[in-house]
Image (spheres, grey):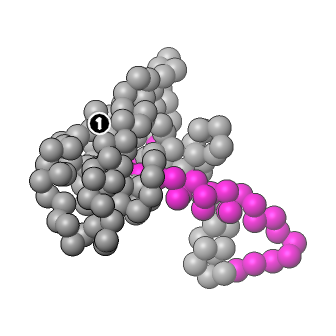
Amino acid sequence: MNLIKMVDFILNVKIEDTIDKDAADIYRNYAKFLKQFIKLEMFVPCDEYGVFMKEPSNYYGWKYYNERSELIDYSDCEEYEKAQDKILFKGFEYVEKRGSFSHAFRLKKSAEFTVSFLNNEVEYFEGWDIELSGSAIKQIFFSTI
């Protein structure tokens, strides 16, 4: 599912997709989703302070092969996993800042661009070709924001 305008969302949601949930709740959730202020953690993994996190060197083995050792502290892998769950938009990667943009971050998708998050809401991206993550879909369809 891609990020779309609120009107298009309302017109395209089928009642059978609501799984016995009141459609009005889903519409409200999507409206609240669009009104969230943009944060870096919506695009790439970030720590509890909103600072970009690089993938831990042992994350792949920890995640996919269940490689564990009692001698190694895996808290960085667990923190990275939690950070992954906060990502709302798929397909972005962090690019190191250049210059003195203190209120912007650089992301790369198909082409590199700078996203300013100061006073912008998710709604800013309506109509862009941005795919929502499973976490975003959960926010909209299965929870209250």
- Please say if 135 is above or below 128: below
Q: Is residue 55 magenta?
A: no
Identify the element where label 1 is drawn. helix
**Left or right of 78 in this view: 33:** left
**Left or right of 72 in this view: 59:** left
Q: Which residue type carries mark 1?
A: Glu
| Residue displayed at 64% across by 45% down | 47
Q: Which residue is mark 1?
A: 123
Q: Quadrant of the N terminus?
A: bottom left
- Residue 72 appears at what percent x and percent y? 82, 68
- Residue 56 appears at what percent x and percent y? 65, 59
- Residue 13 appears at what percent x and percent y? 19, 60
**Left or right of 5 in this view: 117:** right
Quadrant of the rendered image containing residue 131: bottom left
The magenta stretch spans which residues? 67-94
Is residue 86 at least partly visible in the picture?
yes
**Camera-side residue: 63 or 26?**
26
- Please say if 109 is above or below 137: above
